Amino acid sequence: MIQIKTDDEIVLMRAAGLVVGRTLEALAAAVAPGVTTGELDALAESTIRSAGAVPSFLGYRPHPSIPPFPGSICASVNDEIVHGIPGQRVLRDGDIVSIDCGAILAGWHGDAAVTVGVGTVSEMARELMRVTETSMWHGLAAARLGGRLTDISHAVESYARSQGDYGVVEEYGGHGIGTEMHQEPHLLNYGRPGRGPTLRKGLALAVEPMLTTGSRHTQELDDGWTVSTVDGGLSAHFEHTVAVTERGPWVLTALDGGAQRLAALGVTAAT
Ligand code: MG
Ligand code: MG
């Protein structure tokens, strides 16, 4: 079932989204050679809790067969795509780290992710990050009233394919979000436009492409969580939570509501 939010509920989701956006801003600034992913996790938890919110990833367990997630962020390094467990791993110059973060405030969820270069990264890694982030913004720009869900999927994939021979991960994708982190509908990062549910006012979605420099295929590691590329290729992951409004997409986890990046694509963001 798709949860449609009232205007007041979207405002509550914006507050949760800002907690996530500000936390990711702090985390991105803290990324440096020598920092561990566990230190980033501790910073995330303290930042989220000091805003009066709760880290939604901590203890998250989608199924009883899976161990509860032990961190407040997912930290996925280099060939790791998503769901990396933060811990003792030391970030090194030239690494890229994808940080995924979620928070609950007053019962409403925000969910966003960034990939950050550690020190000086290769041209290939920088391009991967740029293309992945921009593909996300193309998807967000397609979150317009009266459109269809797969307009977003198509926008993400089309941009990614236009930029080079990137792998577009298919096993994981975006999702509805509201009083739960993961809600219907599932949002693919590829496919034909004009299909799926109509984009209605009050729908909120997490748009989150994952691209790779090699094969799009994924494998799950023995820790029960971490997902990596099968061929050792690099992966980047960007995510924002967006609400469909009468005034345009409102990017709830972006500090400016998405105004600047959407304007660059010719779309006016709601704020
Ligand atoms: Mg996320
Ligand atoms: Mg998500």
Image (cartoon, grey):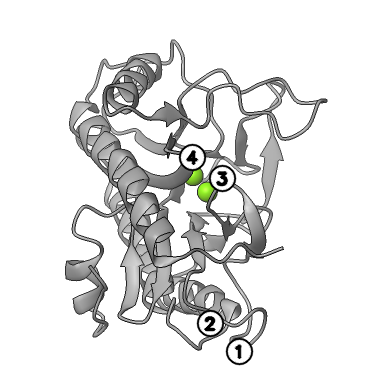
Work out how far the residue at label 2 is from the one at label 3, CA to CA, in angstroms. 22 Å
Q: Residues within 10 Å of mark 2 (few under 14, many from 20)?
A: many
Q: How many marks?
A: 4
Residue on which the image places disc 3: 181
Q: Residue furthest top?
A: 88
Residue type at numbered disc 3: Met
Residue on which the image places disc 4: 107
- Whole-percent x, y for residue 106 in the image: 42, 38
Q: Secondary structure at mark 4?
A: loop
Name the image quarter holding the C terminus. bottom left
**Do residues under tags 1 and 2 come within 8 Å of each other at their CB atoms?**
yes
Relative height, residue 74 to residue 254 (above, below): above
In this view, the residue in front, 18 or 152, is: 18
**Do residues under tags 3 and 4 come within 8 Å of each other at their CB atoms?**
no
Residue type at numbered disc 1: Gly
Is residue 227 left or right of 23 when viewed as pictured?
right
Residue on which the image places disc 1: 194
Is residue 176 left or right of 267 when viewed as pictured?
right
Relative height, residue 87 to residue 177 (above, below): above
Q: Mark 2 or mark 3, which is nearer to you?
A: 3
**Do residues under tags 4 and 2 come within 8 Å of each other at their CB atoms?**
no
Residue type at numbered disc 4: Gly
Q: Earlier in the sequence, mark 4 or mark 2?
A: 4
